[in-house]
Image (spheres, coloured by chain):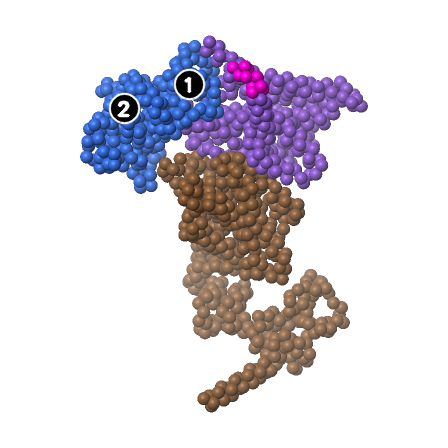
Chain colours: A blue, B brown, C purple
Amino acid sequence: MMAKNSASELMRRDQVWPFLQPAAAGINVDKNVILYIEDLNLSFDGFKALNNLNLYINDGELRCLIGANGAGKTTLMDVITGKTQCDSGTAYFGQTINLLNYSEADIAELGIGRKFQKPTVFEAQTVFDNLELALKSNKRLLPTLLARLSPSEIDRIDDVLATIGLTDMRFQQAGALSHGQKQWLEIGMLLVSEPRLLLIDEPVAGMTAEETERTAELLTSLAGKHTVVVVEHDMEFVRSIARTVTVLHQGSVLAEGSMDEIQSNPNVIQVYLGEEA
Amino acid sequence: MKQALLMLGCWLALWSTQTMAETETTPSYEDLLIELTEANLNTTQPILEQIEATEHPDVLVLFKTLLDGNLNFRKADQALISIIDINGTDQYTEFSTGTAIDPLGRRDVTKIRVNNNLRNYLTSAIGRLQLTSPNPELRKAAVLSLLDNLQPSTAAELTRLRTEEDNRSVLASIDLALAMYSAESGDSTAAKITAIDKLSESLEPSARNLLFSLERDAEDPAVQDAATEALKKIDGKVTFYGYVDQLFFGLSLGSVLLLAAIGLAITFGVMGVINMAHGEMLMLGAYTTYVVQLLMPGYINYSIWVAIPAAFIVAGLFGILIERCVIRFLHGRPLETLLATFGISLILQQLVRTVFSPLNRRVAAPDWMSGSLEINPVLSLTYNRLTILIFALIVFVALLLIMKKTALGLYVRAVSQNRDMAKAMGIKTDRVDALTFGLGSGIAGIGGVALSQLTNVGPNLGQAYIIDSFMVVVFGGVGNLLGTLVAAFTLGIANKFLEPITGTVLASILVLVFIILFIQKRPKGLFPQRGRASE
Amino acid sequence: MTLWQTFLSRRNSLGSPVLPFVTILLGLTALAAVGNLWFPPESALHVSTYTITLLGKYLSFAMLALAVDIVWGYCGILSLGHGAFFALGGYAMGMYLMRQIGSRGVYGDPVLPDFMVFLDWDVLPWYWLGMDQFWFAMLMVLLVPGLLAFVFGWLAFHSRVTGVYLSIITQALTYALMLAFFRNEMGFGGNNGLTDFKDLLGFSLQADTTRVALLISTALILAGLFTLTHWVLKTRFGKVIEAIRDGEPRVRFLGYRTDRYKVALFVYSAMIAGIAGALYVPQVGIINPGEFAPLNSIEIVVWVAVGGRGTLYGAVIGALLVNYAKTRFTALMPDGWLFMLGALFVLVTLLLPKGLAGLYGQLSTSWKRDQTDQHPPNKEATS
């Protein structure tokens, strides 16, 4: 069945073969929307992690996703970045690119960067090497083998090092950094890769109040040039950065709006903010 | 009351005298044999009649030997000796045991002579014995022994017996004999063809041989065609039973794989510990069987019941030792665990080589496991493979119950899913680890007992199974016991069906390649665990 | 300023172990060669031909260890099947050497090797064609292991088979190949393999000069591959490889197609193993299916583990030490070696997870710390 389908797919005359198609030339954001998530469904052994999820993210916006554990926040990010295959639905990046057809590496190259819940940096390598790896560059085999850092690239890395406050530790092994510093390094890796869309999972977990404040500043400054989606449990932090907040509940969108609207939404009060409000 | 007791006493006395009288009047078969050596030609017949009445299984052979004039006795102890001329040299055999003995001098033995009267008696007795034995299996065997030499007289006798016979399987063999008779020398072509049709239902080699000769030599072309047709039908059946036979061998290999892999399904599948010394646990189990047998030389039939728990304990203790001394220090480092346990497997192999010698050892099978179950003339299942198949399933079910129903099983699953949480809940993770590992290894030891019944026991026994076992576990889906069962039998059957086509070596290569490709396609096995936790 | 610092750090990390390693390796080889050819047997400085051959064998093992270290130490791919690539390279060389025998075989057939005559074969199988040409055989030494590694790696890495699973299927791979090569019908001499070689490029394999030349070539090629590998691993490609070892999913999210990187590295490593096999065969004079045995492959891993994975010189030193120990030990008590080897596996993984090189690293850092404690002003220079 599968084979037959793919065979007839190969024979179609109205389109060229997938591998002959030019790589996505650019992201079409004519309608000012950069991410269209429509009717996304995913279940693990009967548990519906995503349930007819619909979500639209505007270009250049800073969006916060909140929701209880198991609401589907991280799973949604997994699907967008290609880590997990969903059962049905679409996820368009701009108007033309269906993300579900791409692998993780392709999606990263299209301009979607991700920071994980648990900071994942390459601990055996220096801070500088970590950033060099993340640098926006040609990531095919041969170019990587022959790559040399250009002065402008080194400047770029230095800028980011200054932004994340790790200039003094540039040649230290990343494994020797504190938890908060690793979070920063990971954000730095996102920055040097210059993505169009940043997906940031719990950026301030394990940070001090001061660091949290700086992170909030940084994220707000990023919005506009980049589109930023933040998943966070820290309500104070969300309030400090958010313009629009989306609440997820049991795999679908429960409410969307400004922080004040969300907090007065009776549904939200019932299922999530209940004890706080 | 008193009367009742008295009557009981009388009755008891009566009964006992009666039984005593019986034993006095019917001498045992062995005594009769001695009487036979002392009798003269006139007194022989009553003794022979008494012998016939004992219905001892050897009577038939005895009469045949006597009829052929081959029965003698040794003067020293009156033991019966059969002397059979084979290609000009006399073969001496002790009759009661059937063992060959050194030739004796002419003066040491005396021949038991028979005259014509006795010969007539013997001939009819042999016929009676063969066809009217109370044991239906013997009757059937008698009929089947007649198949190759069907005379009109035997046919008549069989027709008569058929009316008296009520055992279905004996009836079937009589019918077969009659059909063969009429197929060969029936009155008309029609009768012959009907008989041939009947023969096409049979799988007896002699029926098949008859059909071959009919196909070749029969004068009537219609008979020839019928024979061809019948042969085709038989061939179809033979092929079918050939497949059944292969299936059985496949299941048998599958059960061995299951026994080898099921312990691994616990240690690797559930605990996530990769134990390359698992094969050596099988080997230890097999050597334990060998040692137990050495320790109880006279009790081969019972030693296996001692060997099973012994193998479980020996292999289990080794497993716990390995876990305590090495594996627990390597938690979360699967590749290092792999290397360390490989080292252990080398040490164990060399240990066995040093202690027992590098040569293979043979483990004797108990009586009840030798021989085979004959389903029909072309299909027989050997008891040892059948036993091991059932044994493997029992072990599997027992293990499944342990994992699903006992506290240990619950702890094991809890620890394997979240060690820290389990620890926080007060589970002694160290003990659970050790016990689980011991359980997995012990079961491998039991598998070794089963293996020792199929192959010779040698230091490399385990090595041959380690890769296969891993393949089974990976193929079935890690952490899934039922998957292991399905995978073991699938691989076993696939292997045995490939073997006749490709040869043994190529078959195992093909299965390996298949699994490698399969893992590419479905890295999580046949029955994967899904969900975020499985990442 | 920053550029200068970067440059400094790069130069330091690139230069360090290569120059001493190459110098010591080539220096010792030269000494051994002079000792064998110039000094007469009765001289105290004479190096016997047996020793020369032994050294050559050790060096090709060192090359094999290098190959395993590249994938295991740097990319976390524990291959338990590198013996297969080694053996394939060896068989390619063996086929060339078989064809070189020509009509000097026992049966005197000008084309067919003895074992084929023995099997009553009339024509050379197609895969033996061209093997009489040295360049072609050498091409096969690279291509056959490389191709196998490519196909296998592509299948495995593309479907993301990792960790222990990968190790086991690599072991199954070499096991399957061993079974296949044991078959006479395969056309590689079955059980006995390929042996009774006469000469290589026209030079007799029995001659001392050929033996010394083989040792020198092995040393030169090892030095070359060591330098090349060192360079490869210091490029950004190498950083990606190391990053894959420590967090493959993360590397994918950075936009690198990790499966291609792994396949490339695996093929490179398999080719090195193939070259090692090709150098091994003329020095020991035989190649048989035993080389495919899973135990052989796993022994290589022990060499690397003992020496210290993740450092190229560690792998080489490990191979030399363990093999020297094996030679001495099997001569003293043949049965004991497997006990030794098994104990080595257990002890190294338990006590020396980073091998001897790691031990050296620990000692030297603690020594350095002592130094800096004594001379606080030096701190700036080291940071």
When the figure is inspected, residue C176 is found, relative to residue B486, above or below; the finding is above
C209 vs B398: above or below: above
How many C-alpha atoms fall within 10 Å of the one at disc 2: few (<14), some, or many (≥20)? Answer: few
Q: Which residue is rendered at x = 70% and y = 64% of the image?
A: B101
Crowd class of label 1 (few under 14; some 14 to 19; many from 20; radius 10 Å):
many
* Residue furthest out toward the bottom: B3
Front residue of C90/B441: it is B441
- What residue appears at the point 49 percent right and 18 percent down from the top-left corner? C235
- First in sequence: mark 1 or mark 2? 1
Identify the magenta region. Answer: C371-380
Circle 1: residue type = Leu
Classify C184 as above or below B180. Answer: above
Say which mark, if any, is on residue A240: 2
Which chain hosts label 1? A
**Residue C144 appears anywhere in the view:** no
Residue B304 at x, y percent in the picture: 56, 57
Q: Is residue C73 above or below residue A29?
A: below
Residue at (43, 51) in percent of width and height: B407
Q: Which residue is mark 1?
A: A166
Where residue B49 sits, quadrant-wise, is bottom right
Q: Percent from the top left, x then y, of residue A148?
A: 46, 13
Kind of residue indicated by mark 2 = Ser
Label 1 SS: loop
Quadrant of image for the N terminus of chain A? top left
The residue depicted at 21 percent of the width and 30 percent of the height is: A262
Residue B292 can be seen in this image: yes
Nearest the viewer among A70 and B363 is A70
